[in-house]
Amino acid sequence: MAKDPLNEAGLHFDELNKLRVLEPEVAQKTTELKEECKDFVDKIGQFQKIVGGLIELVDELAKEAETEKMKAIGARNLLKSVAKQREAQQQQLQALIAEKQMQLERYRIEYEALSKVEAEQNEFIDQFILQK
Amino acid sequence: MSDELRTKLIKLKLVSCVGWTTSDELYSCSEDHQILRWNLQTSETSLAVKLPEDLFPIDLHWLPKTVAGKKQAQAEIFVLTSTDGKFHLASKMGRIEKSVEAHKGAVLAGRWNYDGTALITAGEDGQIKIWSKSGMLRSTLAQQGSPVYSVAWGPDSDKVLYTSGRELIIKPLQPSAKVLQWKAHDGIIVKVDWNSVNDLILSGGEDCKYKVWDSYGRLLYTSSSHDYPVTSVAWSPDGEVFAIGSFNTLRLCDKTGWSYALEKPNTGSLFSLAWSADGTQLAGACGNGHVIFSHVVEQRWEWRGFEITLTKRRTMQVRNVVNDAVDILEFRDRVIKASLAHGHLVVTTSLQCYVYNAKNWNTPLIFDLKEGSVSLIVQAEKHFLLVDGAGVYVFSYEGRLISTPRYPGMRTDILNAQSVSLSNDTIAVRDKSDEKVVFLFDALTGKALGDGKPLTHKMEVLEMALDQCGPSSERKIAVIDKNRDLYLTSVHRLNKENNICKIGAMVHTMQWNDTANILCGIQDNQFTVWHYPSAVFTDKDLLPKTFCTKDASEFSHEPHILNYVGTQVTVRRGDGSLVYSSVSPYPTLLHEYSASSRWEDALRLCRFAKDQSLWACLAAMAMSSRELTTAEVAYAAIGEVDKVQYINFIKDLPSKESSAAHILLFSGHVQEAEAVLLQAGLVYQAIQVHINLYNWDRALELAVKHKTHVDTVLGYRLKFLQDFGKEETNKRFVQYAEGVEVDWEKIQAKVEMELAKEREKAASSVRSSVAYKR
């Protein structure tokens, strides 16, 4: 093939017969590369977005986990204090029971005394009737 | 009894102290520098004072209402102590009139005395200072190394009680007087209170106990250990109950220490408790910023078949136990005092007095009261007595004011059921300034009885009671003195000496029956019923036979007889339980018979009952009514032969004068007997009485005075001396023996003549004499 003098001068014609400095092949590859680069940038952008979302999600999760943790600690403490509260309540009720028991004992004594009086009076009535 | 609670409003900071102005208005101080005014009628709360930021109040006390005898409608100024060592006098409107630098460190307590003339403050620096009403320092009463947490005035404002670590100290204001000091608690004592009516001391400490002491420092009651330290104590004004505050705890106790009610409000520690002046409401300052109000409800009264309960503040429930009928009584205002006895219920509210008849609960009699705060109601069969801050009033059950007895220096605020007694015709009031003195008044006129002189006993009187039945001329009063001896005396013969008779010893409590003059009491560890206590005036020897005793161990320690109605005695034991005991109904019947002179029935009753004590009672009753035939039978039944003989001798006496005199002699009234004889002109008989009693001096004196029978006296004296182989040592007898010759025949003749003369005289009035003997 005969050498194109233009080629030697570094000038080429493309398919549209436009004068080019670069070889058409190279030019094509460059274009392809450009395209690929663009693609790549797009993808990286997308990836970043996805990762950002992920991080946000994880953060949220972390937050939730934290609150849950606090809740758990609170609940645990509450549980502990409930035991104490119950103890205090029990103590109070115990005191009230003791008080009522004392009152009951007083009533028991009163009842006994009254029963005794009743027995005495019955005896008296019997005696009275007998003597008559 | 229990108490009903209401807590009010949340204040964020601790409330340190509370104080009542009237029965419906309270001031409270808290650590957020506020003094709040609480109106209970309108349930309003308003800010009274905003204190400076650096003032933290500790204690508040209102100046007493009665200042130097003058009465004020309500308290006008109060003292406020604070942590910066000052106390402040502030007016009701909240203006701080004066601030006085009093102590180094906090002023822990400030208290006015009862007449409002002096103020005492106690500080962290261990000093106790007395100030005048205007805040001028009068003296430093005491100084010690540890802080004084609480002080209280004695009932007469002449002594001060304060705490010193675990010890209590009573220090009189007089510098030379003896100081009383004793170890009271196992922990630091936080609060003390001293009641002016019952003179008892209350203390609460960090050993979680409260204790009741008398004013000599003797322990009367100690509580079991609580869960938390006792932080406040307060006597109710009438001294019947007290309140105890601790962490989440409010307790209402009887004055003997046992507990009526316990509440566990959610209040934190109760730092201060205060009763309203009428004793129906209690306010507490709570650690969590609340102010707690409580009312005493569920009080109960019983009389025969009726049971009355104060169910709410203004509502009472009457239950007739016999037929289970229930009536509800409603009142316009809060019930302050009530009393149920003798078939009537008397209720006082803050404005009115309601009188109900037990037969009809629907239509009470209502009248207005001059002053609301009635502190005591005492009932008798025909009328009742009200005591308020100004005086003592007797009202009939128809609501008519009968009388208002008073005596100089009367202090009505300290009268209680032990120091006032009422019967149908007489009122007895024990004096406070001199406890040996009992004032007696005619209930119908309000004037002092007899010559106006009060009854003065040789010892301090602790308790006294008038009998309830029989004619007013025979009204008797029973008195328990400081030695716990029981005495009986008539209220009408106070001018004569020696008529106060001891009828019992170690008597802790006593009560008259409501239908007959029978007295019951607890003597040492015996329950004693004096069926006829007046026997001591007719025949002393008979008294031990007229009472019956039974073992009182069922009443345990420190029993108190609440009432003696019909045949039933109600006793409150030391632990608060009620115990009943029945008494034989025969003595009551016997009293009835003797009062209506039905001696035949009385004799039949005694024969039926076959009871020695009943016979003894009858003997004494008959003798005091000069019913010799019955007395003879009764004395014979109890085997008193000598008495029977003497009665026979009296029956054989020729004239009624001499038998009257011998009946007096029978009861040991020699002077009266002599007077009767001399009045009837029976000089010889009078002389003979003294000769028989070996009362030689008086016999001779009479003989000489009337110029007769000097030889008789000398003759008997000689005979007496010969019989005992003694020499005459009496100068007067020696002197008269010289001038007079003793001739027994002559004496006999003279005596015969006298007796004949008496017979002759009696014969002329034979009709009346016969009638009399019958």
Image (cartoon, rainbow, N blue to C red):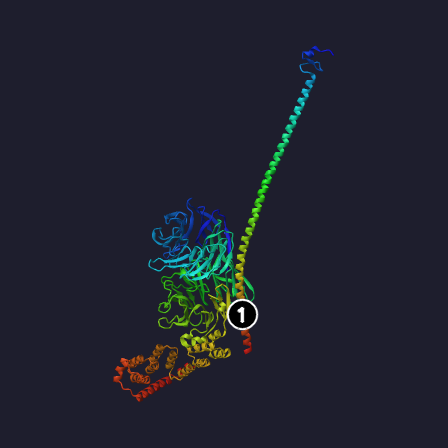
Question: Which image quarter is the C terminus of chain B in?
Answer: bottom left
Residue B389 visible here: no
Q: Which quarter of the picture shows residue B277? A: bottom left
**In the drawing, does residue B762 fall left or right of residue B315?**
left
Q: Position of residue B441 (x, y in %)?
A: 39, 67
Outermost residue toward the top in this view? A5
Which corner quadrant of the image does residue B535 belong to?
bottom left
| Residue A101 x, y percent position in the rendering | 54, 61
Residue bearing the label numbered 1? A116
Direction bottom: furthest residue: B745
Q: Position of residue B541 (x, y in %)?
A: 41, 77
Horizontal side, residue B647 vs residue B328: left or right: left
For disc 1, the chain is A
Query: What amino acid is at disc 1?
Result: Lys
Q: Choose between B352 and B726: the one closer to the eye.
A: B726
Looking at the image, which is closer to me, B50 or B581?
Answer: B581
> Total label count?
1
Question: Residue at coordinates 56% horizontally, 49% vertically from top-left?
Answer: A80
Quick one: SS at disc 1? Answer: helix
Disc 1 crowd, CA 10 A, few/some/many (<14, 14-19, 20+): some
